[in-house]
Amino acid sequence: MVFNNRRILFAAVCLAVGVSASAYPFIGIRKNVRVGMHWAKLNGDFPLGQEALKPTVFGGGLEIGLLGTLAVEGDLLYATKGTHYSSGPESGDMTLRYLSIPVVVKYKFFPVLLHPYVFGGMAFNTLLSAKDNGVDIKGDLESGERSLIAGVGVEAALLGKGIFVEACVDLGQSRIVKNSDIPVLVDGIRTRTSRISVGLLF
């Protein structure tokens, strides 16, 4: 009977250690890969009606876990911004493709198997290409932009690894038009993007 009790106690301790290892946010460095979708429009004085452009975004990065619930994350993403616009019977897509480097601080709540978190920071975006209905307009735009990021997510952790789902807004803080005679490219236009993404941490 004593032997059986000891076996039960040993099994309980092993289970507790396993759950504890998966329950608490990771401290250290982890890699991530992600894929998601943008809902992109343009802010400012854009003169035409808009509907969201819905391109794919993907990339990866590093998360540095600090103090259990606090983390700093930097990513490298291939991200398309812009808008789908219309004026009467005419419509078109303005696609702005960026190499984006977002750097955010994440705060994770509740050290349980699911870790909800909030995050915020800034992205530094380098323009790779820009087209208006297939016409190259890169020369009319600034070579880069900055944007503010804020969002929420949830991570499911297991023995130091995890999967996550995130939703965020990405609000351009710098104008994107440099010099242009194209009517839709008025001064003061900024990007505005919502994003949902899923990914792996390992």
Image (cartoon, rainbow, N blue to C red):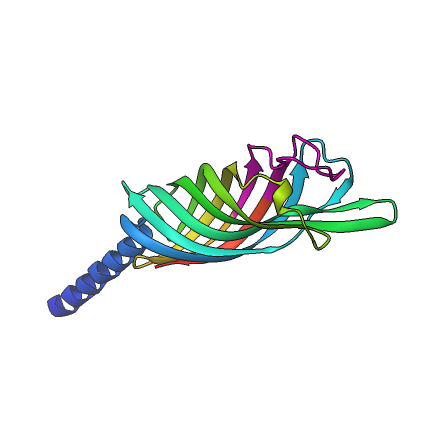
Comparing 160 with 63, the one in front is 63
Q: Taking 12 as reference, is 134 left or right? A: right
Q: Position of residue 193 (x, y in %)?
A: 60, 43
Observer-nearest residue: 3 or 161? 161
Q: Is residue 162 above or below residue 173?
A: below
> Is the magenta region chiefly helix, strand or loop?
loop
Quadrant in the picture for the N terminus: bottom left
Outermost residue to the left: 2
Q: Quadrant of the C terminus?
A: bottom left
Instruction: Provide the residue span drawn in magenta.
Output: 167-193
- Residue visible at 17% across and 67% down in the picture: 7
Q: Front-most of 81 and 121?
A: 81
Describe residue 149's horizontal placement relative to residue 94 as left or right: left
Q: Nearer the viewer, residue 189 or 36?
A: 189
What's the residue at 73%, 53% (across, down)?
Answer: 133
Q: Within the magenta stretch, is there residue 77?
A: no
What residue appears at the point 42 percent right and 49 percent down from the top-left corner? Answer: 75
In the image, residue 93 lies at what x, y percent? 72, 51
Count of numbered circles in the view: 0
Residue 94 x/y as whole percent: 69, 48
The residue under the point 39% across, 56% down is 32
x, y percent for residue 128:
54, 50
Q: Is residue 72 above or below residue 21?
A: above
